[in-house]
Image (cartoon, helix red, strand yellow):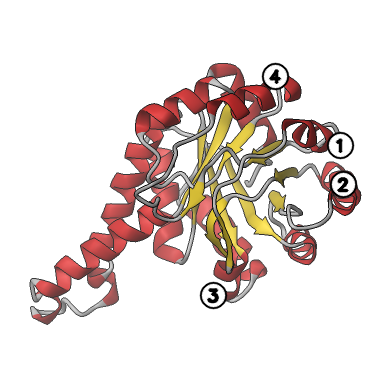
Amino acid sequence: MLVSAKEMLEKAKAGHYAVGQFNINNLEWTKAILQTAQENNSPVILGVSEGAGKYMAGYKTIVGMVNGMLEEMNITVPVALHLDHGSYEACYKCIEAGFSSVMFDGSHYPIEENVAKTKELVKVCNEKGMSLEAEVGSIGGEEDGVIGMGECADPQECKAIADLGVSMLAAGIGNIHGKYPENWAGLSFETLDAIQQLTGDMPLVLHGGTGIPDDMIKKAISLGVAKINVNTECQLVFAEATRKYIEEGKDLQGKGFDPRKLLAPGFEAIKAKVKEKMEIFGSIDKA
């Protein structure tokens, strides 16, 4: 059964580890991540972007697939199904479809409007026992066509949003979605520290987990980050394993063209990457 991310993240923050949000793109992705979480006794968050939602034929399709897998695969670790960077409209669609968690990205609204919409969603999510993630300050890199340079959020604004009763807060601390540029300045731990001091026990979220050095990840966790989002890295290893399989001509041998065989190396590559991340985040055996 899907659960809200609230409890798993509060436990993670108190225990100084982080739960990974791994974005899903199709059945293979979902199965690989759930299997890895179960094998390593780790809580996990399945992230779905609006684009991936459209690609997978809608939010109800995704809820059906994930709920089916939880049952058929006997998944007992805590699993949250979370809308990643949701618009106001998408949040309501996911609430209706049966997601257990949503992120309302109101960072592009004026702060007053962001506050008003967040307040309303807090009420709805609380009534349904769902968790709600809010974002303050834009995360750098390209995200749904919006390019940002990795600005740092204003700690006072973070406190204002945290005080509305959201379950977790994503704050820009110089992090970027996708691959990091050569001249990246690194994470601003001063900003993170200031935010954590003002937001107390609120679990903080680090977006753009791909390409941040492990020691920085561990330091961020020590300063209150309890959820780390990973997407690009799984896509890169999946593509690399698939390329290798085809370049070696394995799709031309016997029934190597069967999608179950063709996608198997990519599936295993995702599993290995997710396990590696869970080790770094410290979530293994924390279910």
Residue labelled with disc 3: 55
Pick the front one: 24 or 66:
24
* Lower sequence index among marks 1 and 2: 2
Residue labelled with disc 4: 197
Neighbor class of circle 3 (other Cα within 10 Å; few <14, some 14-19, many 20+) is few
Residue 27 position within the rendered picture, expressed as x and y whole percent measured from the top left: 44, 65
Residue labelled with disc 2: 115
Alpha carbons under labels 1 and 4: distance apart: 17 Å
Residue labelled with disc 1: 164
Q: Nearer the viewer, mark 1 or mark 4?
A: 4
Circles 1 and 3 in contact, beta carbons < 8 Å? no
Circles 1 and 2 in contact, beta carbons < 8 Å? yes
Residue 220 falls left or right of residue 157:
left
Q: Residue at horizontal 55%, vertical 68%?
A: 52
> For the residue labelled by badge 2, is the local secondary structure a helix, a strand or a loop?
helix
> For the residue labelled by badge 4, is the local secondary structure a helix, a strand or a loop?
helix
Q: Nearer the viewer, mark 1 or mark 2?
A: 2
Q: Nearer the viewer, mark 1 or mark 3?
A: 1
* Lower sequence index among marks 3 and 2: 3
* Residue at the limit of the structure toward the front, as seen here: 183
Tag 2: amino acid: Val
Residue 236 falls left or right of residue 248:
right
Q: Is residue 148 visible?
A: yes
Circles 1 and 4 in contact, beta carbons < 8 Å? no
52 shown above or below 199: below
Alpha carbons under labels 4 and 2: distance apart: 21 Å
Pick the front one: 238 or 154:
154
Tag 1: amino acid: Leu
Where residue 98 sits, quadrant-wise, is bottom right
Alpha carbons under labels 3 and 2: distance apart: 30 Å
